Image: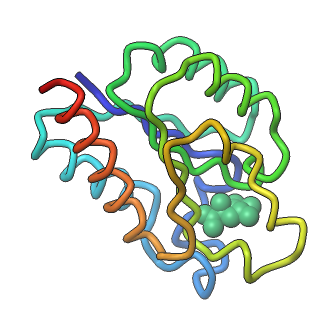
Amino acid sequence: PYLVVIHGPNLNRLGVRKPETYGTQTLDDVISLVRSVADGYGLDVLDKQSNHEGDLIDFLQLHGPGAAGILINPGAFGHYSYAIRDCLEDIARPTVEVHISNVHQRESFRHQLVLGDVVMGQVVGLGTEGYRYAAEALCRRYRNDAA
Ligand code: DQA
């Protein structure tokens, strides 16, 4: 069993881009964090970062249906990608959306989160620690569903 971890555009630059907003942890650091949580529940992690919407959808269509859960930081796609929203709706696996920054305190174009109605929950504004909470929530959901 495995969790799918998806990162959208520009998140390959984590740790370098706007550290005052997104912190100093790198993408590898946050994936290791998720891995360490998942490990404790006997779950593997399958991760994908892409700057291309269609690549993320291809990956989700391939690996999403078999996943114990999906953790997604869609980056800016979270504000407007109906295609990713529809894909998650179609896959219908427990999904938690993470945004490192509190998007509601930022520019108004970041206030809309279009995946909201197809995810189990959202972790917003808690920094990269948010990944820990999201991973915990997905792992516990998996453990409860399996019981
Ligand atoms: C982000 C917030 C988005 O608005 C932004 O486009 C990102 C990162 C976050 O994790 O805070 O790329 O998803």
- Compared to 83, does 113 lie above or below? below
Q: Is residue 53 left or right of residue 15?
A: right
Relative vertical location of residue 109 with respect to residue 122 in this rendering, above or below:
below
Quarter where residue 125 is shown: bottom right
Q: How many marks?
A: 0
Locate the N terminus and report the quarter of the image it occupies.
top left
Q: Position of residue 86 (x, y in %)?
A: 73, 25
The picture places residue 145, in percent across and down from the top left corner, at 24, 28
Foreground residue, 140 or 22?
A: 140
Give the left or right position of residue 67, taking residue 71 as reference. Answer: left
Give the answer, above or below, for where 137 lies relative to 107: above
Quadrant hosting ligand 1? bottom right
Residue 34 in the image: above or below residue 3: below
Q: Position of residue 82 (x, y in %)?
A: 82, 34
Residue at (80%, 53%) from the top-left corner?
79
Outermost residue on the right side: it is 109
Which residue does the image show at 81% across and 39% down from the upper left? 81
- 129 with respect to 49 (left or right): left
Colouring mode (rainbow / by chain / secondary structure / one colour): rainbow
Position of the C terminus by quadrant? top left
Name which residue lies at 48% across and 75% down.
127
Name the residue at 28% across, 27% down: 2
Q: Residue 122 sits in which quadrant?
A: bottom right
